Amino acid sequence: MRYQYFVKGMVCAACVAHVERAAGKCGFERISVSLITSSISFESALPEAEVKETLTRALRAGGYDLAPEPKKQTTDAEYRKIKRNLILSLTLCALLMFVAMGHMLGIPMPKSPHYPALSALLQLLLTLPVVFLNFKYFRGGFSALFSLAPNMDSLIALSSSASLAYSLYSTALILFGISPMENLHALYFDSAAMILALVSLGKFLENRAKRSAGDALSALSSLIPDEATVLVGNQYQKKKVSDISVGEIVVIRAGEAIAVDGEVMDGFGCADESSLTGESMPVDKKTGDAVHASTILRDGFLTVRVTKAQEDTAIRHILHLLENAASSKAEISRFADRVAAIFVPAVMGISLLTFVLWLIFTGSVASAVRPAVSVLVISCPCALGLATPTAILVGTGMGASHGILMKSAHALELLQATKYVLFDKTGTLTVGRPAVRDTSNIDGTLLRAAYALEKRSSHPLALAITAYAEEKKVHEAEVEDFQNTVGKGLFGRVSGKSYFVGKREYLAENGFSLPENTKMGMSEVLVGELESGRVGVFTLADTLREGSAWAVERLQKLGITCVMLTGDNKEAAKTTADALGISEYRASLLPEDKAALVAEYKKKGKVTMVGDGVNDAPALAAADIGVAVGAGTEVAIDSADVILSKSGLEALIPALSVSRLTLGTVKQNLFWAFLYNAIGIPVAAGVLYAPFGLLLNPMIAAVAMSLSSVSVVSNSLRLKRKKIEECPSKFIEKKEEKTMEKLEITVEGMMCMHCAARVKGVLESLGAKDVEIALEEKKARFAAEEGFDRAAAVKAINDAGYGAE
């Protein structure tokens, strides 16, 4: 079973590494620790109570602890507290700098012999509140240090404590009258306080940036309303969404966010499902259709039966996927974690060595403290720890906004390295439904007869011919003596003549002379008129998905080899492959054959498998990256690493674009994080002092350290402004425009606005739009699609207790 908990006390990549090691020692498997979400997830066969106790004990041994799930209100309150403490710290530091460095600014200082002692005590009094306001760095830092798992807080605590301790020593000398003026210049209270204040400033800015990086998750969460209107008997009641059970009836009015996953029981409406699919065009909803939580009913009125518990809704599933992706680790991130694990101890060693060397060469403790403190302050494991997860978080959020769901950071990292894309044919490259592609010798009489007979069959080819005839506005004719010979075809008399519809063999058996089959790789349905001997041919084939050809063409231009796999015969496979420009294809494959081919291509390079059906699941699981189209089966979606919720292959190109941009940002972040430390630590240690006389002040080091973390997060946020390659607008499904007509119904018995609302709701439930109720005129005016059933509307209003005509 997989568990997830929130951890208190993690501040940098070293913390992440320690928490991961601690959980590993507990015997937990597939551990993933996220600095961004302050969470840990892992798998264990132990019961939850034992898991929680074991994990708590391991974390506390290292100075960490479990924390409750952060709520938005709690997070906002904590954010305000950090901001308040920061303002107080900076204000006190400004006063401290004035006292400590006033003489350097030309401000007249008292000539009193007690001035050094007064100045030292005043600096101490101004420093102590800053230490108190930022005591968390000392508590967490020394706790981690004593647990032999030092982190960034340990560096801050050590550097600030060293400055504070030496300053207290100098203050004592001043109070005892030992070289007061000389020791006054050896005070580092301002450095101790400014280190804490500037680190807090960096944390504040970093926190703001991380909150912005998580906007995609927050925005999706906020789409789910807290309450919904539930129908109890004949009464409408407001109820918390968390208290609504499967089977209850929820009503949704125009403009409301849908709070549940369910099935429309009654009514008609138009829903905006962009939060789930990324598709901007509204979708009509009628009786029997599914609706989903987080979508918005733009128009209409729906009565919905709840079919899924709140934790099982589609939006919750998406949120879970995004959270998992944000907290999971890419391989490049694991490298950064390994470096961070040894980084803090190494920095402490360099700082100690710097102190010893400066003490030997200068003979002055004051001169040795400054560079040693600067080394501790300037080193920044935070930048290393944030380099990957912030970019991953932003990247997965970008993908979600385009209808692309990445299940893990691993998928986001590997997708851009794809060398081969293997496509399933039916339902992936094609829509999975046959359609009439061509006809031969089909006139109006044969088409009308075929339509009349096929209308009585549920065979997929019959449905395709029926749809074709309806497009041609063919009217249905009466059929006599109807016969269905299973596996062969249909017979019936239409307008006094005998007709056969079906396979070649069926018509041949009944004495027809048949034309030659010239459409290899396609299905045929023949229709023959017995009296005249005339035979017409419908040629049918699966229809290519909109955007499939464009997606294949773009992939090939990117240097990616496209291969089609199908269980269909070779002729059907060749027809589809030729239409898409795919030169490599394999036909007549079983599910295990597809998985074997994936393994074969993996020897040549990274393989992405795209599919939608149960038979694709083994191949999806075997590939480096499995991609499922959104309309696919649940098994295929569960086996995939990436889900294209728009149900179109054209979304694969933006997915590759997001992957490439994200990995590029991760590499930039890691490069700058390593470069910053490679340059900053030697400079802080004083390597430039001998040639240039340059020695870094600890306060400047604190500014540099803070900026390094903020710059990494800010660079990740730049991803949001980068352009993702999207599919041409011609492949985006457009809502069919329907002819609307204005209607009017006279309604007796309406007495008040409540009556008006009731009648309006009745009409909207039947699909009426722009309903206006004129009480004084006793009229209901509305717009409706051509063919609206006015009689049904009148009956519904009468059933509601009013008189309509």
Image: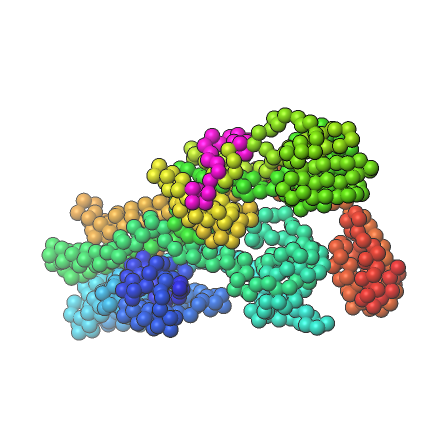
Residue beneath the point at 19% across and 72% down:
172
Task: Give the extent of the magenta segment.
Answer: 571-594
How far across and how far down the image is residue 514, in percent? 67, 27
How far across and how far down the image is residue 659, in percent? 43, 44
The quadrant where residue 230 appears: bottom right
- Evaluate whether residue 519 shows in this view: yes
Residue beneath the point at 24% across and 68% down:
147
Q: Is residue 180 toward the left or the right of residue 522 in the image?
A: left
| Residue 543 in magenta stretch | no
Q: In this view, does 671 lie above or below 216?
A: above
Q: In this view, does 301 lie above or below 589?
A: below
Q: Is residue 264 toward the left or the right of residue 66 in the image?
A: right
How far across and how far down the image is residue 403, in percent? 53, 48
Quarter of the figure that contains the C terminus:
bottom right
The quadrant where residue 206 appears: bottom left
Q: Is residue 392 above or below residue 136?
A: above
Q: How many labels does the image show?
A: 0
- Evaluate whether residue 374 shows in this view: no
The answer to which of 501 and 355 lies nearer the viewer is 501
The answer to which of 490 and 412 lies nearer the viewer is 490
